[in-house]
Amino acid sequence: MLPDHESYLRAITQPTRLYIPSQVLGSIPSDVKKGVYAWWFRNIPPDVPVDGTVVADDRHLLYIGTGPVSPTSKSNLRERLRSHVSPDASRSTLRKSLGCILEFPFEITRKSKNNLHYGLGECEARLSQWLEKNARVSWAAHPSPWELESYLIKRLALPLNVDENGHCEFACRLHERRKALFAEARAKLGE
C-alpha cells in the first residue's frame, strides 16, 4: 500500500527546515535514496505568478522534483538535487527555466553531441549565486516519489514545473520560451 499522499502534501508544504542550496546535499541522510524535493524562492522576477503558491518562511514554493524520476531510474534523491545545485544547466530543468526567466546573458553552447546548455563560465556562476541568495530547498523521503510528484503538480500552483503542468498558463509559456531558445541555439550551430 502506498503512503497517504495527503500526509506527504503536508510534509512538502509545511517544511520543518529550509536549506541553502549549497547545504542541501549534506542534509539528506545516506540511507534515504527516494524522495520529493521542493524549491522555495524570494525576490522572484515580476513575470512569475505567485498567486496561489504555498508560502513558508517568506518564500514561495515554485518547483518540485523527485529522485529517482521513475521506478527504473538509476538516479536517487541526492543525485537529482546535485544536478540543480551544480553549475551546469544541461542537467537541470530548473536551471534552464530560471536562466530563461532571469534573462541572464547566457550563451547557449554545445557540451557534447546531444547536449545544449548555458555557457559554463560566468553565467552559470551568476545563476548559482542567485540561487544561493534567493532559493531554499526542502525534501521528504517517499518510496514512490514519481507518483507523489504527479499528485503534487495537480494539487499545487507550481509555475516553474513545466512537465505535467498543462493547467498552469505560465508553465506552458515558459516551456515554449525554453523550446524557442534551444531551437535558436541549434539554428546558430547549423542544425
Image (cartoon, rainbow, N blue to C red):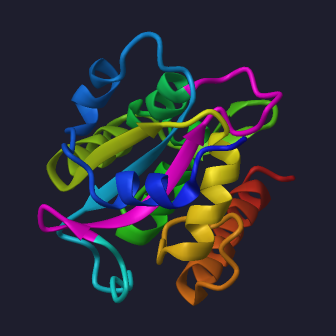
x 50%, y 32%: residue = 83
Asked if the stretch drawn in magenta spans residue 43, the answer is no
Residue 177 left/right relative to 98 = right
Q: How far across and how far down the image is residue 52, in percent?
A: 37, 86
Outermost residue toward the right in this view: 191
Residue 109 visible from this viewpoint:
no
Residue drawn at 46 percent across, 33 percent down: 81
Q: Which residues are magenta?
A: 55-76
Where is residue 107 drawn, in percent x and y?
A: 50, 51
Q: Is residue 139 left or right of residue 126?
A: right
Viewer-proximal residue, 43 or 187?
A: 43
Q: Residue 134 location in percent, x, y?
A: 19, 56
Q: In the rendered view, would you say 172 is above or below 163?
A: below
Report the number of numbered marks: 0
Q: Is residue 157 visible?
A: yes
**Foreground of the two, 128 or 12:** 12
Residue farthest to the top? 30
The residue at 36%/22% (across/down) is: 28
* Figure quadrant of the N terminus: top right
Vertical relation: 49 (above or below) 77:
below
Residue 3 location, quadrant: top right
Q: Residue at x 62, y 42 (%)?
A: 145
Left or right: residue 170 versus residue 22 is right
Residue 155 appears in which quarter of the rendering?
A: bottom right
As displayed, is residue 64 above or below residue 35?
below
Can you give x and y, in whole percent of width and height, for residue 47 in the image?
36, 86
Is 82 or 58 nearer to us in this picture? 58
